[in-house]
Image: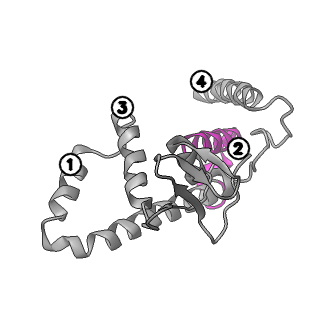
Amino acid sequence: MAAESTDKPLLIKRYASRRLYNTETSDYVTLEDIASFIREGRDVQIVDLKSGDDLTRQYLLQIIAEHESRGENMLPVGVLNDLVRSYTTQSMSVMPQFLAMSFEMFREGQTKMMENMGTINPMAKVPGFDALRTQQEAFLKAMTGGVVGATGPAGEGEAPSGKASAGGKGDDLDEIKKELAALQMKLARMGK
């Protein structure tokens, strides 16, 4: 079940043994659990139990480093070089604001793209466009962990056709494959 997004961050306490404790559910969590909370839209705060020091930044950087070391490369080497350089230059003072604004623009762009997929797009009149739009929404939702798809017409828990899915994600994938095959047939007929 997805963690609910609230104004108050989820408090994680780090014990002397370096184990991480979720104060809401009263159980121990791993870095991957924390990454899942964040992907679900929840902010977290990690503090040292004994000293009270905020360790959030340290653990978030560790999560990113683990993903990068597993070959899930999101940060190009050039960007990493620029970040390292910014620690020793005058740009250090503006870099955090620049990065925050860039990510906010990225999130807004994703939301607008989903909203505009069927409203202002002249392609909306092309036969089979609705099926293509539904497939794109499902793809974007899968690629972003569900964050982007929440604004699209196919809501959480619905199959791309708008019908409730009884079998889960496998049924959604089968439905998308069927719709893609139908769309390819329509496009092939239009091309003749």
**What residue is rendered at 13% in x and 69% in y?**
89
How far apart, in angstroms, are the residues tagged by discs 4 and 3?
43 Å
How far apart, in angstroms, are the residues tagged by discs 3 and 2?
35 Å
> Callout 2: few (<14), some (14-19), or many (20+) C-alpha neighbours within 10 Å?
some
- Contact between marks 4 and 2 (CB within 8 A): the answer is no
How far apart, in angstroms, are the residues tagged by discs 1 and 3?
16 Å
Closer to the camera in the image, 41 or 142: 41
- Residue 121 lies in the magenta stretch: yes
Residue 37 lies, with reference to residue 139, above or below; the image says below
> Where residue 78 is drawn, which disc sits there?
1
First of labels 4, 2 by sequence position: 2
Q: What amino acid is labelled 2 in the image?
A: Asp
Q: Which contiguous range is marked in magenta?
A: 118-145
Residue topped by disc 2: 130
Residue 123 lies, with reference to residue 104, above or below; the image says above
Left or right placement of residue 132 versus residue 113 in this view: right
**What residue is rendered at 42% in x and 67% in y?**
53
Residue topped by disc 4: 192
Residue 167 lies, with reference to residue 45, above or below; the image says above
First of labels 1, 3 by sequence position: 3
